[in-house]
Image: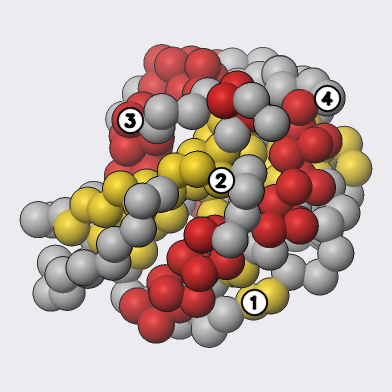
Amino acid sequence: MGKLEKITVVLLSWKRLKNIPIILDSLYRSKDVDEIILWNNNTTVQFSYKNKKLLLFNSPSNFGTSARWCVALLAKNPNILFIDDDLVLTPSQINILLKKYLSDNKRIYGCFGKNLEDNKYVFKTANGEVDIVLGRVMLFNKRYLYQFFQWSQGKVGNVEDDILFSLIFRKKHYVVDVGEIKELPSPYALWRKKGHGRLRQEMVDYCLKYIT
């Protein structure tokens, strides 16, 4: 497989510290992944992981989810894969996702998605073609980062940034069936916070008003 088909994984860490070595071990074994950018938002812990695939940043501040969008600009590959720090994708699952993506890399691919219903965000799971690919797993071409920053207008780091990124394409994306994905402990999950549904809908409203 040529260089243009290799993946840079962007992995963000904060408080789920015990999950990181498990995730890294799986990523190291993937032949499709030849770069991993690990950004540590936890200022009380210094990571010291070393691997030829790994580019490690111990941040002096907690920049929230904005960090992964910014460090993705440093990726040496055009194919960017965001993975949350409570999921383990096996090498074969990554390969399935990549093959589907390479068939049409002008949209986002992932493993979890949603469809809008009458312009409303719903929590019903959606597969195949979707309006929104959830940020838990997102595979996309680096060239689309420009339009993300162009439209974000200070919303970079907003936990609803996956909605923003999905809707700026003005087209359907695709949720790929890669089989059961291993879930790791997920304390501090943002979706558990009060008002999560309201914030999701506010981002949808913003996108429908100014973008679509």
Residue 103 image label: 4
Q: Which mark is residue 105?
A: none
Residue beneath the point at 63% across and 39% down: 139
Spatial CA distance of label 3 from label 2 is 15 Å
Task: For marks 1 and 2, give the one nearer the viewer.
Answer: 2
Label 1 – label 2 distance at C-alpha: 20 Å
Other residues around mark 1 within 10 Å, as few (<14) / some (14–19) / many (≥20): few
- Looking at the picture, how far across and down is residue 123, in whole percent? 75, 59
Above or below, 206 against 176 in this view is: above
| Residue 183 tag number | 1
Say which label, 4 or 1, has the lower sequence index: 4
Question: Mark 3 belongs to which amino acid?
Answer: Leu
Task: Report helix, strand or loop for mark 3.
Answer: helix
Give the SS element for disc 1.
Answer: strand
Indicate which disc, 2 or 4, sits on the residue closer to the N terminus: 2
Between 1 and 72, the one lying in front of the other is: 1
- Amino acid carrying label 2: it is Val
Identify the element where label 4 is drawn: loop
Q: Amino acid at mark 1?
A: Glu
Q: Quadrant of residue 97?
A: top right
| Residue type marked 4 | Ser
Task: Calculate the distance from the C-alpha at mark 2 to the C-alpha at mark 4.
Answer: 18 Å
